Image (cartoon, grey):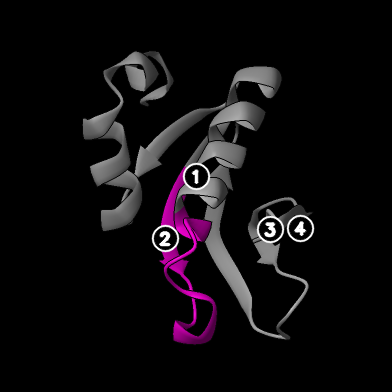
Amino acid sequence: MDDPAISLIDEGAHGEYQARVADSIAIGRLTWVRRGTVLTTEHTLVPTEIGGRGIAGKLVEALIADARAQGWKIVPECSYVAAAFKRHPEWADLLA
C-alpha cells in the first residue's frame, strides 16, 4: 500500500487536511476552525472504501507536525483526535 498524499487546505478561519490514495477517488478529511493560533478540530472522516489503511492517523500526524512548526495549539473536539492525544502524551504541550 502506498502512503496517502496529505495536503492542507487553509482558508484562514477554517480548513482541513485531506488524504488521497492512488487507487481511489475517495478523500479522507480532518476539519478544523482557527481562532488566532488555536485550531479546534471538528471531524475526522475516512470513507469506508479507503478505511483500514491508517489514514485517520496520518491526518492527525500531519496536524501535529504543522502545529509544532507553526506554533499552533489544538483543541481536540473531534473524538478521534482526542483519543489520539490520549495515546500520545508527548503531544500534551500542543493542547490549548
Residue assigned mark 4:
9
Residue assigned mark 2:
42
Residues under labels 2 and 3: Cα distance? 21 Å
Q: Earlier in the sequence, mark 1 or mark 3?
A: 3
Q: Camera-side residue: 53 or 74?
A: 53
Q: Amino acid at mark 2?
A: Glu
Q: Position of residue 58 (x, y in %)?
A: 55, 47
Q: Amino acid at mark 4?
A: Ile
Q: Amino acid at mark 1?
A: Val
Q: Amino acid at mark 3?
A: Pro
For label 3, the SS is: loop
Q: Position of residue 95 (x, y in %)?
A: 36, 25
For label 4, the SS is: strand
Residues under labels 2 and 1: Cα distance? 12 Å
Region rendered in magenta: 40-56
For label 2, the SS is: strand
Residue assigned mark 3:
4
Q: Position of residue 20 (x, y in %)?
A: 71, 68
Instruction: Report if residue 50 lies within the magenta region.
Output: yes
Query: Which tag is nearer the camera, tag 3 or tag 4?
Result: 3
